[in-house]
Amino acid sequence: MPSTSIEMTSLSAAWAPVVRRPLEADQASAFAPMFKALGDPVRLRLLSMIASAGGGEVCVCDLTGSFKLTGPTISHHLKVLREAGLVDSDRRGTWVYYRLVPAALVLLTGLLDITSAAATN
């Protein structure tokens, strides 16, 4: 697993939504790769395609046809998502299957949750 997954595990109990208190520098450094990965339209589309795939995973062969990009470019974008800890993958023969890492989205959702601030106001 990428180091971001390890950081996510240690972050899960150590952070609060940004509306409650500012992030520490190490927390911001751990979250930044996830936001950076999602800052690209191709990667955001890939993540949404993986997350909404029936059966919880999708073959890379089913992703590449949706883009006017080469296979290596799609692979690069998937690698960025994987290194950011947003998706995980398994190789089966010649194909790689991708699935969402739900804990990563839970962390990002919690970080941006403004409802906890509204409840205290």
Image (cartoon, rainbow, N blue to C red):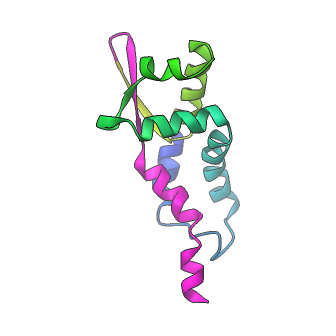
**Depth order, front residue of 49/76:** 49
Q: How many marks?
A: 0
Q: Quadrant of residue 37?
A: top right
**Is residue 51 rendered to the left or right of residue 80?**
left
Q: Residue at 46% of width from left, 57% of height from top?
A: 106
Name the spot of residue 3 as percent of width and height, x first. Answer: 52, 41
Look at the picture and state if 74 lies above or below 20: above
**Is residue 106 rendered to the left or right of residue 44?**
left
Name the spot of residue 76 as percent of width and height, x first. Answer: 60, 22
**Depth order, front residue of 90/38:** 38
Q: Residue at 32% of width from left, 36% of height from top?
A: 54
**Is residue 61 rendered to the left or right of residue 40?**
left
Q: Which residues are magenta?
A: 92-121
Q: Quarter of the image containing the C terminus?
A: bottom right
Is residue 2 visible in this depiction of the protein?
A: no
Q: Residue furthest bottom?
A: 121
Look at the picture and state if 105 lies above or below 55: below
Name the spot of residue 107 as percent of width and height, x first. Answer: 50, 58
Q: Residue furthest top?
A: 94
Instruction: Examine the structure image and report whether residue 47 is included in the region drawn in magenta.
Output: no
Q: Quarter of the image containing the N terminus?
A: top left
Instruction: Examine the structure image and report whether residue 95 is included in the region drawn in magenta.
Output: yes
